[in-house]
Amino acid sequence: MSSEVTVGFDRGYVKSMRGILKVSECVLDMVGFICASVWIYWTHAGGAWVQFVTISAFITTLILYILHLFRIIYKLPGPWGLIELIYYVVFTIMMLIAAIVCAARAWHSSIIAAAIFTFLATAVYVVDTFLLFRDWQSGSSTTTTMTETRTTTTTETYDEKKTTY
């Protein structure tokens, strides 16, 4: 049996924990970006940083989700488990800093909402980073964590010969 991965839609990834985490990260990033963009007078007081972090995290997470969803990531060269882990560590730290900036500058309701959503996004990124680290530490690669089911059926027939005397 060949372990070759074909590019195509992976229904199992949509329902998996990783797929659900990536969708929730994208939603929280986008809502945080919108909340940070409503009050335009705080861009000089850290709002631009929050906008940059949330929209860049959204774009990169969406790209990774699409790469996993269509199994494209398994065809790309490189240690994608490690690359994704490094990405999540960096964005977890950046999201935490953005959430602290929002909380420190929370004088408007939209900034308070941005702080809440960036803290929630930080928590989801921490969970995803932990799961990626655990897989990387155990030696699992991106191709071995793929959701794919194969079924093999084997049938054998035996001819019986009867001897008559």
Image (cartoon, rainbow, N blue to C red):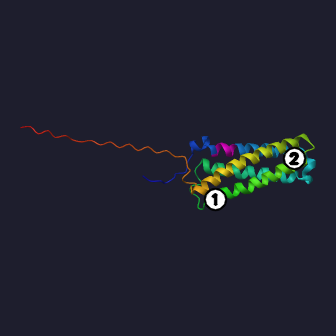
User: Looking at the image, do the residues carrying marks 1 and 2 touch, with CB atoms under 8 Å apart?
Assistant: no
The residue positioned farthest toward the left in the image shown: 165
Residue at left offset 71%, top offset 42%: 24
Which residues fall within the magenta stretch? 18-23
Q: Is residue 112 above or below residue 140?
A: above
Residue 63 visible in rendering = no
Structural distance between the alpha carbons of marks 1 and 2:
32 Å
The part of the image, by quadrant, that contains residue 112 is: top right
Q: Position of residue 74 (x, y in %)?
A: 57, 55
Identify the amino acid type marked 2: Ala
Image label count: 2
Residue at left offset 86%, top offset 46%: 37
**Circle 1 Cα neighbour tier, 10 Å, few/some/many (<14 / 14–19 / ≥20):** some
Indicate whether residue 20 is drawn in magenta: yes
Residue at left offset 60%, top offset 40%: 15
Q: Position of residue 39 (x, y in %)?
A: 90, 45
What residue did someone put label 2 on? 103
Q: Position of residue 114 (x, y in %)?
A: 84, 44
Identify the amino acid type marked 1: Leu
Sequence order check: which comes first, mark 1 or mark 2?
1
Callout 2: helix, strand or loop? Answer: helix
Checking the image for residue 82, the label placed there is: 1
Callout 1: helix, strand or loop? Answer: helix
Specify whether 92 is left or right of 82.
Answer: right
Q: Is residue 74 above or below residue 118?
A: below
Q: Position of residue 155 (x, y in %)?
A: 32, 42
Question: Taken as a whole, is the magenta stretch helix, strand or loop?
Answer: helix
Indicate whether residue 68 is drawn in magenta: no
Q: Is residue 135 above or below residue 20?
A: below
Residue 35 visible in rendering = yes
The residue positioned farthest toward the bottom in the image shown: 78
